Amino acid sequence: MRLSNIQIHRKLILLVIIMVCGTLVTASLAYRFTQDDILNSRKSQIQSVVQAGRSQIMALHQHLQQNSITQAQFDRQLQELINATRFSGSEYLYLYNIQGVNIAHPIQKQLTGTNQMDMRDDDGIYITRKMIEGIKENGSVFWEFRWPKPEGGLAVPKLGYAERIPGTELIIGSGLYLDDLKPLVRARAYTYLGITLTVLIAALLFAYRIASNIAHPVTRLAGQMNTLTEGNPDLEVLDTERRDEIGDMARAMQCFRDHVVENQRLRTMQDQVRFLETFDPVTRLYNRQALGEAINKEIARHDRDCQLAVVVLRLDLLHEITIEMGRERSDQVLIKTAARIHDELHSDDVLARLSEDTLGILLSNVTSREALETLSRNLLDILAQPVQLEEQRLQVAGRAGISIFPDDGGYDFQLIGRAENTVNQAKKQERDLLFYDAVAHNEPNHSIELWQEMQKALDEDQFYLVFQPLFDLENNNPVAAEVLLRWEHPEKGFISPAQFIPVAEQSGLISRLDAWVLEAVAKQVRNWLDRQLTPPRIAVNLSGISFLRPDFLDTLTDIFGRHQVSLDHLDLELTEGVLIDDLELISDQLRNIRATGVSISIDDFGTGYSSLSRIKNLAIDNIKIDRSFIDELDTCPQDRKIVEAIILMAQGLNLSVIAEGVETQEQLAELRRVGCDTVQGFFLSRPLKVEPFEELLEQDLVIEID
């Protein structure tokens, strides 16, 4: 098995086993060497004692040769020397001659004067003979035999040592009892055993600590990686504070997790964009664009002989419910009403929300004009049924406008637009239901042409910007300007935004228009900076589709970066409808964009889908009070209270308040009284082209109202 195929904790166990075996082998060798060292040490001791005795005998023998002492004195002193020499408790000296006769033995005196050449121990070893043979061969000898201890008892193993005394035939010897080494060897063995066990235990504990420090985090990281690869980034990556390789892996895992989170955020934003491109966020019905696509698919799928119908239902009084009771109540009414209508339709029919108070229906199974009228009146009856909201019963009536394919148009926008025009005509004629009549409406078929012309206008820069100033009520200065898009066709002249903006939204050109506006703003600010003029902050109305695109921030920074213009000059205005769904997703996008220096304003506040309680945690700077609250500000106490409450709450949240649609002195005076920060409207200035706007910036405009 390859080492790379073994798990880490098993590798560590294998390492510990190898380490334990190595330690045991080392300890065994050390014990063996210790035995040899002790034995050699005692051998050296015996040699030293024997050689010391030899030196003394040689000195006596020299006295004998010099006749300083007699032979009898020499023999007596030899006996005294041998008998008196004792060491290490039980060791002693003895004396033989080369013929094997015992000259002196301090323990077994009966041996003195006897020839011991034939003396054997319990194992049959010739003790004296082996000693003499070794001395004759080498002059000294170590040999083993068995001999009783001085205190008596059985013979035990003994190591003898003897050497010949030079100039004489005498042999002096001694020995050590090997049993006397056992306590010392045992003590050494216990010492080594203790050290070995201590080292092994410490090694095992350290190895376990290392194993835990490595294997457990690696196993945890592997599990977290599996969790991440399964698409679940909601985990906390541990061990990122470590400074070893595991810490490096943990930090890499953290980066990977961040990438997974960011990818999920981008996918969520993409899903949000796709959702907004197809569905109405309040009712979850198809939007205008999706209804148009469904119409075109049905037209392409059927023969030209089939009949399709588009029914547009406009809910009367829904706008008034919004003003009087708030957006939440009107949304509830709309949702309940739409659910009732949906229950009456066939599975092949398509229900969509076209605008605030308008629903659109594609009927694909039209059998006759009479049946279509019957179904439409049935839907109107459903609209007229009261809606119960807690303690309130609210009732909205409706009107229907109907267009039929192929008689009333061959394209989606024709059928939808003509049905909308028809429902408007029904309101003027005070009728509840009306079929489209091309002769009565006298409507030219120009939507496709307008769409094509708009693409050409984008390519040829036929669009231009006008600037509506925003005035600071504290110092009366124009502090900013809202840019508005205008189209001057080279042949048809001025084309109203009310005509081309809906077509852009339906056809998918709205993102290109937004990008064109941002490019034009960056160019104009660059022009002012090059002329050493102080640019005001420029407010740009931005569609929710552009804002929620994952690459919008990159697009924004790229446009202003190419012109070397700081994003501090830009204010993006978003409608409340952008904020209604995934608040966390919107919050991230707002924080990222605002971090570049862009300021954020919520446009048409009070008519959308949010409230101050919903947006209080969003990274925004301003709210713009919708003009519907300003129109009757000086005459309607309810509007005054609403505006005053919005301003107080916004200022409590450190948000600046902008009032749009100011058209009278009385409205301006009331806004100043309630503490509004900034105003715009025709009373102060209409939208201006760039040259008149630059002149306005250089003027001292007094807007004080007494």
Image (cartoon, grey):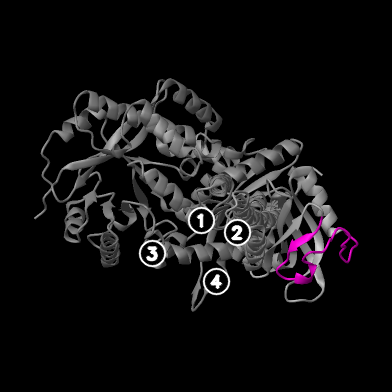
Residue furthest to the right: 124
Residue indicated by mark 2: 206
User: Where's the N terminus, which quadrant?
Assistant: top right
Q: Nearer the viewer, mark 2 or mark 1?
A: 2
Q: Residues within 10 Å of mark 4 (few under 14, many from 20)?
A: some
The mark closer to the camera, 4 or 1, is 1
- Magenta stretch prevailing secondary structure: loop
Q: Earlier in the sequence, mark 4 or mark 1?
A: 4
Q: Nearer the viewer, mark 2 or mark 3?
A: 2
Residue 346: which disc? none
Residue type at numbered disc 4:
Pro
Residue at point 28%, 61% (across, down)? 643
Depth order, front residue of 694/635: 694
Indicate which disc residue 581 carries. 1
Using the numbered discs, state the Cα–Cα distance from disc 3 to disc 4 in whole angstroms: 30 Å
Q: Nearer the viewer, mark 4 or mark 2?
A: 2
The amino acid on which the numbered mark 3 sits, given as a three-letter code, is: Ser
Q: Which residue is mark 4?
A: 386
Q: Nearer the viewer, mark 3 or mark 4?
A: 3
SS of the residue under disc 4:
loop
Q: Is residue 214 visible?
A: no
Name the residue located 38 percent from the left edge and 66 percent from the top edge: 324
Which residue type carries mark 2? Answer: Phe
Q: Is residue 629 left or right of residue 415?
A: left
Q: Identify residue for label 3.
A: 613
